[in-house]
Image (tube, helix red, strand yellow):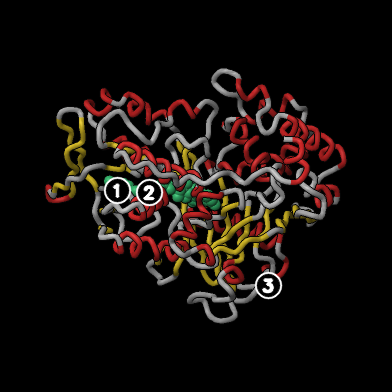
Amino acid sequence: MIVIGGGLAGLSAGVALAEAGWRVRLFEQRPFLGGRATSYVLPDGEHVDNCQHVTLKCCTNLEDFYRRVGSAGKIKFFGRLLFQDPQGRTGEMQAGLLPAPFHMFGSFATFAPLTLADKYCIGRAMMDILRSKGKPRDLEEAGGISMLEWLRRRRQTPGAMERFWKVVLVSALDEELDRTDARYGVDVFWKGFLCNHTGYRMGVPGVPLAQLYDGCKAEIERRGGEVNLRSPLRAIHLAGGLVNGVEFDGGRQETADAYLFALPHGALSELLTEEIKLLEPSLANLDNIRVAPITGVHFWFDREVMREPFVTLLEATTQWIFNKTALYGNANGSSGDKGQYLQLVISASYDLLQKPRQEIIDLCLAEVRHAVPAAREAVLIKATVIKEAAATFSPQPGVDRWRPMQETSIRGMFLAGDWTATGWPATMEGAVRSGYLAAEAILRVAGTPRKFLQPDLPPDGLVRMFS
Ligand SMILES: Cc1cc2nc3c(=O)[nH]c(=O)nc-3n(C[C@H](O)[C@H](O)[C@H](O)COP(=O)(O)OP(=O)(O)OC[C@H]3O[C@@H](n4cnc5c(N)ncnc54)[C@H](O)[C@@H]3O)c2cc1C
């Protein structure tokens, strides 16, 4: 079995197939594993995540994957999400004693950045999601409708739009509301906030991302397989309607019983021949899947400036501030014992793509100093900006029609990647789901079916009673 691509999709499929007794040979073009969800060392010696990555408790397959590779203990879960507006008012989202779907009622009622009118219209929209069990009727309209349109139909106030819907959804889906299919937006609230009282709990790695994959190579090798780094795929060869080999640098050819292409859709598209697109027409449409950017800004201060593990800023360019020093258990990396390392995240950062790095640093530093008073006195020792222009696929209305299944009509050719048909947006959970679905498809075709896909969190509390 050959797997191309060492991101979460390729790794989860590789580990699952190794467990099922297959000899997995994984090829990754970069010198490290993890794909977009990884970390590396900067030229100045600093270990940084490609960007801060977070998960939610409702991401059951990612959690299962971390468990399989011995990394589940490296994720810290938090039940309190903190928000702060430019006026310094704060609000929390935290489950209280009431059962789902009312578990957030207490913190929502006292959420200072929202007015009573904002809360009333948000509550009405939530009831609509709840009554329809996450499937309001207008989501089924041909071609899909945007989240903005869905919210307009439910007459949301400007405050509710700016300080609630946009804040949660741009971070979760990496796209503006007018370019987001309402199906994805509604799903975030149904799975994350309404149907189960733990679904919203946020998991943040307590180690640099690459360390989460330490167990993958060992697991694949333990079953006789291998992980080949610095091995970019250059060509896919077909004969008689089936894949009969793949080619790497120097004309090196490799063959296997089955091939799993777990590449980003743009990278795969460049390797597809006309013959492949003719045999599997869904692959002719990959260029219709658009991409969206995320920008990460890393600040190292000479002293501690914040205690909270993370905070979300409202109505600012900076959406999240993560306290990496606290999340890593007070290890400060190379910036000295008393310093503090913060990582800022800006999703759907279209406006920043063309901006010079120094301008982004100045803008974000001013926002951090406004939001975190202790940062005003602190000295910024160094800063770096990581722009990912193609961070995720854009969840545009109707995008699902361009997402291919994991099993293709070309014998021996399977697909995985967050962009394949999983029903999930571009997330680590979506990538692992695609990997598990691909592994299931391979075993099904081989005549040895096995299940890897994990069920969603079950509805609980009153949602369960009325489901
Ligand atoms: C900045 C940023 C922030 C994000 N934040 C979050 C978050 O907080 N939570 C969340 O759930 N998700 C987040 N995501 C999305 C998440 O990272 C992705 O959805 C997920 O990692 C995709 O995994 P994948 O395996 O499908 O693709 P990838 O991770 O892209 O893996 C594909 C692999 O294929 C390799 N490859 C490409 N071409 C070749 C070739 N020719 N030969 C061999 N190998 C090749 C690549 O090097 C890569 O390792 C974020 C993404 C980015 C970029």
Q: Residue furthest top?
A: 142
Whether residue 11 appears in this view of the structure is yes
The amino acid type found where label 1 is placed reads Val
Which image quadrant for residue 213? bottom left
Residue hosting label 2: 13
Task: Indicate which disc, 2 or 1, sits on the residue closer to the N terminus.
Answer: 1
Q: Is residue 224 above or below residue 113?
A: below
- Provide the secondary structure element on which disc 3 rests: loop
Residue occupying the point 46% across, 65% down: 70
Q: Is mark 3 within 8 Å of ligand 1?
A: no
- Provide the secondary structure element on which disc 2 rests: helix
**Closer to us: 134 or 264:** 134
- Residue 236 at what x, y percent from top left? 21, 38
- Residue 44 at what x, y percent from top left? 40, 70
Whether residue 389 appears in this view of the structure is no
Residue occupying the point 53% across, 66% down: 74
- Provide the secondary structure element on which disc 1 rests: strand
The amino acid type found where label 2 is placed reads Ala
**Closer to us: 284 or 323:** 284
**Closer to us: 26 or 349:** 26
- Residue 383 at what x, y percent from top left? 51, 64
Res 96 label: none
Task: Indicate which disc, 3 or 2, sits on the residue closer to the N terminus.
Answer: 2
Residue hosting label 1: 3
Residue hosting label 3: 377
